[in-house]
Image (cartoon, coloured by chain):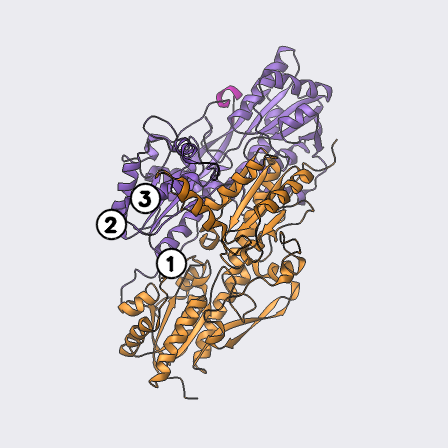
Chain colours: A purple, B orange
């Protein structure tokens, strides 16, 4: 193929932020400055919105210290966007790219971002414009195809696991039912991370519900009752995306109920709905007095000063690698292959076609979910533990031998 | 006064857990083993419940490594209790103490715990029993009298500040209205910590509402609208304890509304209510499309692996000091006096009478709240910053000069 052109580059960050998406951006920047083929590196302000509005910031002038701070900063430092560009939208972006002599395009995001890169790249192909379009994976949901896992997942999973460890100890101290609602509309990977901090036999969460399995309210309540009878308490992790037997999300069902019920005073549209609803149902079941619920919300993806070391390093490496690939290839998405597990954990990066990642999503494989559909398996723990990093050891004394 | 008796000691942890209450416990244990006057150190299982049921675990046998892990573990390792003992209840405790030859009593908790220690100590006095009763302060609310601040507050404040830093960056990336509801029924210290991570002029939270000021829904919406007009977004921190002009909590008002409205399907009793209600009101006001709300919930007090260094060290020192005082005095509560601020921050521990701390609570002083009642002041930042420790620096690029 042709030599890499001497031209300008655009990088953008799309979709929901994560706590390591800036590490990928830092990786793109630090690699780009090494290559004289890349003249200017433009950061697209608010992703595709900045690309159509011709709004860019310079990224080549950042010093090494700023890059390290950037890599450790949560959320998307360039701003993000929820726009899902169609062909018309992408044409406008391409026009701006032509005008600015942009021949390199790096887009950090999920499957929609891979699709945007794919469409723009196809437009360039049609007119014989040498555009090098690369997707850098990012998502707390961990639902991209091809790659073993996604940058962003490990840190969000570390947050969820740490929160649930502390929450379980809190629930031991003041026993009752505790329900935690965790992000993940379609894939249960993040909710499943709730179980990664379990060490003692009676450590919670004792039950974990992911969207890959139908969620029955009766089974939910009876599962909890069984644990409550055994331990005198029960900690539960539930995905926000749980669906009923017909594939309708419980979140949507609750909203419907509430719209029927409300006379203007209560608008059930915030993020605590599902947790409160589930707690209400368990209270109604009547076997436990103390029932509490939390919704982890945006903290899961944007908490400051809390990264999984392997996730942060991989996110940055993926950014660097995308620029390296652009010197050799026309397009692609950076993916990770696992080279070892446990103490031998490691990854190799490789290139896959944009079309392999665009639009599609991945769910939790069956082997990661137990037969009853209310917990994770040891196979999941083996898969996810190295991604979130080592968790703190904790001590609980009240179950020691009495004197 | 009389020499310290050679006898057994009891230590307990009461009320809502914190992420450093175990550091205070570790402090009690490591100091107790140094004093031959203390023969056995009994940990009361689930606080006063264990004391009346005669349920204790041995604490003198823990090794140094376990003590360090304990000090870093969130929640109350001995279990906790919400029981508020009256005189009858305390009599039963005292009987168990007599039976077990317990002459030292260390109780880690808030103002109720100080009161319990005070009652039991008075009972001992009446019959001439040499009981040495000491209270070790603990509360994320920071609402105890006498002491400059309370162990537990700094770590919870660090969590809240870090969460709000990340949340504000998230809100920059995808602009809209974001409301965060933070713990604190009566005192606004923890909610106020939301503002400690602000560095840039437009950093959020842009508005902070504490329970010390009346909360008007009209003012709330118009405050947000003003910020939204200025920055195109608005991040808000609200205490769970906010009250209307008549001193009725908004949480109670919402519950009343919801009970009027619901026909059995929706039970608005979980912890997301207030956040969702406030988000609903802002949506109704109609000036912004994207309105989101989170309730930080139990994560604030029990997140694993995340302590303020000064808070953890002070909590442990307070535990040790209580034991030292018990060798010299009959009773008391450990308190902290600040010896310097900023880079010269430090504390001195001192003893105060149980009666000075028992039952009473402290609110945010006026000088910590701005005149409009919707933000904190520089005086609060000076007070609280050293308690939560250094926060990470973050980078945001989208506001840089456009190229």
Label 3 – label 1 distance at C-alpha: 29 Å
- Which structural element holds mark 1? loop
Q: Is residue B231 above or below residue B304?
A: above
Pointer 1 residue:
A395
Q: Which of the 4 image quarters holds residue A213? A: top left
Residue B358 horizontal/vertical position (percent): 46, 71
Q: Are marks 3 and 1 in contact (CB under 8 Å)?
A: no
Q: Chain of mark 3?
A: A
Residue B304 horizontal/vertical position (percent): 45, 52
Label 2 – label 3 distance at C-alpha: 14 Å
Labels 2 and 1 in the same subunit: yes
Q: Residue furthest bottom?
A: B1
Q: Which of the 4 image quarters holds residue A377? A: top left
First in sequence, mark 3 or 1: give its number. 3
Quadrant containing the N terminus of chain A is: top right
Eye-nearest disc, 3 or 1: 3
Left or right: B380, with A152 as reference point: right
């Amino acid at each position: 193929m042709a030599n890499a052109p001497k031209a300008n580059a655009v990088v953008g960050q799309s979709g929901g932020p994560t706590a390591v998406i800036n590490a990928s951006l830092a990786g793109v920047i630090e690699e780009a400055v090494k290559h004289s083929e890349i003249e200017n590196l433009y950061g697209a302000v608010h992703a595709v919105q900045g690309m159509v509005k011709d709004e860019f910031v310079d990224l080549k002038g950042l010093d090494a210290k700023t890059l390290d701070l950037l890599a450790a900063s949560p959320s998307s430092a360039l701003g993000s966007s929820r726009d899902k560009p169609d062909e018309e939208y992408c044409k406008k972006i391409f026009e701006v790219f032509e005008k600015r002599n942009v021949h390199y395009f790096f887009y950090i995001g999920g499957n929609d971002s891979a699709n945007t890169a794919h469409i723009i790249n196809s437009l360039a192909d049609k007119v014989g414009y040498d555009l090098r379009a690369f997707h850098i994976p990012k998502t707390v949901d961990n639902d991209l195809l091809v790659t073993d896992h996604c940058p962003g997942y490990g840190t969000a999973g570390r947050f969820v696991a740490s929160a649930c460890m502390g929450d379980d100890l809190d629930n031991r101290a003041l026993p009752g039912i505790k329900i935690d609602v965790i992000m993940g509309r379609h894939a249960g990977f993040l909710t499943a991370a709730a179980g990664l901090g379990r060490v003692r036999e009676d450590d919670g969460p004792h039950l974990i519900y992911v969207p890959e399995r139908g969620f029955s309210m009766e089974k939910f309540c009876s599962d909890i009752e069984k644990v409550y009878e055994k331990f005198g308490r029960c900690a539960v992790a539930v995905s926000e995306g749980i669906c009923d037997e017909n594939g309708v999300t419980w979140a949507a069902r609750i909203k419907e109920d509430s719209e029927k019920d409300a006379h203007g005073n209560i608008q059930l549209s915030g993020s605590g709905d599902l947790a409160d609803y589930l707690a209400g149902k368990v209270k109604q079941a009547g076997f436990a007095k103390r029932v509490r619920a939390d919704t982890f919300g945006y903290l899961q993806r944007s908490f400051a000063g809390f990264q999984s070391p392997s996730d942060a390093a991989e996110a940055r490496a993926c950014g660097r690698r995308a620029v390296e690939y652009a010197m050799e290839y026309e397009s692609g998405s950076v993916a990770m292959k696992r080279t070892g597990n446990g103490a031998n954990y490691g990854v190799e990066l490789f290139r896959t076609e944009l079309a392999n990642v665009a639009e599609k999503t991945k769910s939790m494989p069956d082997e990661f979910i137990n037969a009853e559909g209310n917990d994770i398996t040891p196979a999941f723990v083996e898969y996810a533990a190295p991604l979130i990093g080592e968790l703190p050891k904790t001590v609980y004394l009240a179950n020691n031998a009495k004197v």
